[in-house]
Image (tube, rainbow, N blue to C red):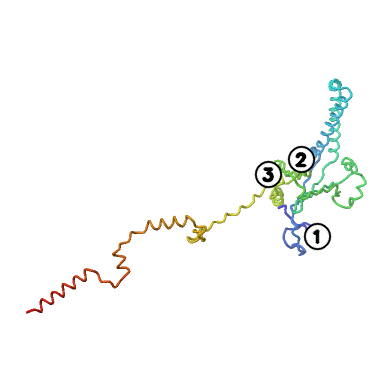
Amino acid sequence: MAITAYCKKCNREVEPGDICPRCGTKLAKSAAHAAWVVERRPVTDWMCWNAVMRWLLPAGLAVLLLGLGLEAVSGGAEAVEKLLRSGFPVTVLLLFGGLLLIVFLALLLQGKELMDYVVDSRGVHVTRYLPEPTPVRLLARMKSPGLMSRVDPEAETPLLRLEEQDLPWRQVARVQLWPEKCYLLFYAPAWWLRIPVRCTPFSWEDALFYVRDRLGRKKTVMLPEHLRIQPERKPAARQKKAPENDRLPRRASESGPEIRTLLREEARTEPESNPEDASSAEDPEAVPAAAGEQLELDLGGTEESREP
């Protein structure tokens, strides 16, 4: 694991956590970081050549265009054509090739160097060290030989800190991945390579974790799709069905023809009323007509039975 924490009291890397396992000091949240060291030789490192060519190519093109522009102003199109037929383009190419040869020799004399990479919650930090420094190696890096005074002569492996680079997350405009070479390329602005970070197979995923955590939600930063964090979609609230009473308008002025239509439909669905059923329902004590006729017959039969 490349993720560690730095204890200020112990002045060393410890296991990440809330408390230092060695001295018991409380560790800050920003103490956890991904840190690793890579050894490289500038003469065989593509990123060193990339940094050189980003300056040499525009410079050579500017010299060529400047010469053609001066000839066009002074002599017109004929002068430009004459210049192209002469040895001026060949001279520019030879000059460019000579500069490349000088750069190759300078990178060869630089020897090896150590790159200390740290990726944390604040940004990307790179420190370049020169092991076993010599005046020749310093001159090849265009550094003063007077820096040799900073080297501890009693150290087993003398180290000289050459350069430090810091890139906060808020300045990063684009991140490009080169997984074949384990490179993370940070651009600021989007068209200029600011810091190339060379990872190891063990620190690759840890570095991507910090990039995804700090830049994955920023829409203004250009990132690969698998490093972008998609916003969580909230579930849509279900609409509650209104009760039957709330479906009808409450005000008479708002009801209008709607209530009248409902009343007409209810009137059509009611069964037709029978007048006899209505009269019996209105007077429950009324005696039916058939009962009166039966009573008269009974009385008549009683009188006849009384006669001798």
Q: Earlier in the sequence, mark 2 or mark 3?
A: 2
Q: Which sits earlier in the primary sequence, circle 1 or circle 2?
A: 1
Viewed as shown, does residue 138 lie left or right of 40? right
**Distance between mark 1 and mark 3 Cα atoms:** 36 Å
Q: Position of residue 292 (x, y in %)?
A: 21, 71
Decide: is 171 above or below 106.
below
Q: Secondary structure at mark 1?
A: loop
Residue type beneath disc 2: Trp
To which residue does mark 3 refer? Answer: 224
Q: Is residue 255 left or right of residue 129?
A: left
**Image location of residue 301, percent across then percent down:** 13, 74
* Mark positioned earlier in the residue sequence (1 or 3): 1
Which one is closest to the eye, mark 2 or mark 3?
2
Mark 1, mark 3: which one is toward the viewer?
Answer: 3
Residue sitting at 80 percent across and 47 percent down? 115
Q: Amino acid at mark 3?
A: Pro
- Give x and y (percent) for residue 59: 84, 33
Disc marking residue 8: 1
Above/below status of 290 relative to 226: below
- Type of amino acid at the residue the image marks with label 1: Lys
How far apart are the two marked residues, 1 and 2, measured between alpha carbons?
37 Å
Q: Which residue is mark 2?
A: 191
Residue at image location 89% in from the left, 53% down from the top: 154
Image location of residue 183, percent across then percent down: 73, 43
Which residue is depicted at the point 74% across and 59% down? 29
Count up the numbered dots.
3
Q: Could you classify mark 2 by the number of other residues whose Cα lies within 10 Å: few (under 14), some (14-19), or many (20 or more)?
A: few
**Callouts 1 and 3 close, C-beta under 8 Å:** no
Residue at 87 percent of width and 45 percent of height? 133
